[in-house]
Amino acid sequence: MAKRVTKLQKLQSLGATANPTRSFDSLREDFLSYLRSECHLSENTISAYHHDLNRFLGWLGSRRLSSLTVNHLSDYVASLQDHGLAPTSVSRNIVATRTFFRFLQLEGTVRDNPADLLLTQKNWQRIPEVLSPKQIDQFLRSPRKTDTFWQRDVAILEVLYATGCRASEVCSLRMKDLSLEEKHLQCEGKGGKQRMVPIGQRAIRAITIYCDELRSTLASRRSPESETLFLSRTGQAVDRIQLWRLVKRYARRAGIHTKISPHSLRHSFATHLLAGGADLRLVQEMLGHASIQTTQIYTHVDKSRLQRVHQQFHPRA
């Protein structure tokens, strides 16, 4: 990192930029290497930044990177909104753009970082989509025994809601991560951080049925056999795209027409716990949030709990 900064400082002292005509393909590849080797981001995050960068470069067209101002980038953000991107997606694109410009500064391709002046992530935060307990019940009952791999699908859905784990965490669960007798499992979250998550009896029963009746058949289709818990028809680990499609399919069958994804079950998990009186810091620990501020968004979802607390404890309620 020090070598890159020195290079930039030298260029600034000369009043020049390094190779301003450098191709986008070259910048893209070097940026991804930078994210991997110097920022130490996960492959999922790098993939998301890659997607966001491609969108930005597509918008950029014939414009020169060195000529962009915050007004130009504000127009880019407006274009994201015009295309119907969710506030959280707009926010992630802003972060990706900021990071890209910081990389360009280190490379000496640009002198300034106008992206630093864009609105911060909290300005784009929104209340997450949450299913009601009745919708959750309909959703978890939607797989049928006539469905191919219904045992696996039931187990996946139950685990998503029972643990509040992210889609990537559920996909990467291994057999050795299960401690069903102790009613918990171990998952690996963002940044490689591991945590223990409680799991309920219904999810335990679903996992047991899946392992007893189906998993060994799926595992035998690949050599060597995968250690991952949830397997596809070819014996490989179920990936996030498969998981997303599975959730969408069963949501439609359950008559849920709102936008739903694996993350919706995580949102519902947290909201229902807090609505039932769970301690915010315990929910933070179960979700694997580094900051309690991230968990606090769920306190805004269920207003009924706040009303109950106010009525119970305020002397003039």
Image (spheres, grey):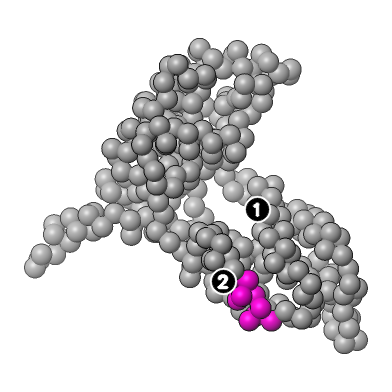
Whole-percent x, y for residue 60 in the image: 73, 69
Q: Is residue 70 magenta?
A: yes
- Residue at 52% from the left image edge and 19% from the top image edge: 148
Whole-percent x, y for residue 21 in the image: 89, 72
Q: Nearer the viewer, mark 1 or mark 2?
A: 2
Quadrant for residue 171, please give it.
top right
Position of 117 with respect to 63 (left or right) is: left
Q: Is residue 88 visible?
A: no
Q: Residue under circle 1? A: 48
Vertical position of residue 220 compared to residue 137: above or below: above
Whole-percent x, y for residue 267 in the image: 41, 48
Q: Tell me the CA gap for discs 1 and 2.
A: 20 Å
- Residue at 44% from the left image edge and 44% from the top image edge: 260
Q: Residues within 10 Å of mark 2 (few under 14, many from 20)?
A: few
Vertical position of residue 37 compared to residue 56: above or below: above
Position of 36 with respect to 124 (left or right) is: right
Q: Quadrant of the N terminus?
A: bottom right
Q: Secondary structure at mark 1?
A: helix
- Residue at 66% from the left image edge and 78% from the top image edge: 72
Is label 1 in contact with label 2 (beta carbons under 8 Å)?
no
- Residue at 66% from the left image edge and 21% from the top image edge: 234
Quadrant for residue 114, please give it.
bottom right
Three-letter code for the amino acid on which mark 1 is drawn: Ala
Q: Nearer the viewer, residue 104 or 79?
A: 79
State which region is magenta.
69-77
Q: Residue under circle 2? A: 78
Q: Quadrant of the C terminus?
A: bottom left
Q: Is residue 120 visible?
A: yes
Q: Secondary structure at mark 2?
A: helix
Three-letter code for the amino acid on which mark 2 is drawn: Ala
Report how many numbered discs are placed on residues in the image.
2
Position of 207 with respect to 32 (left or right) is: left
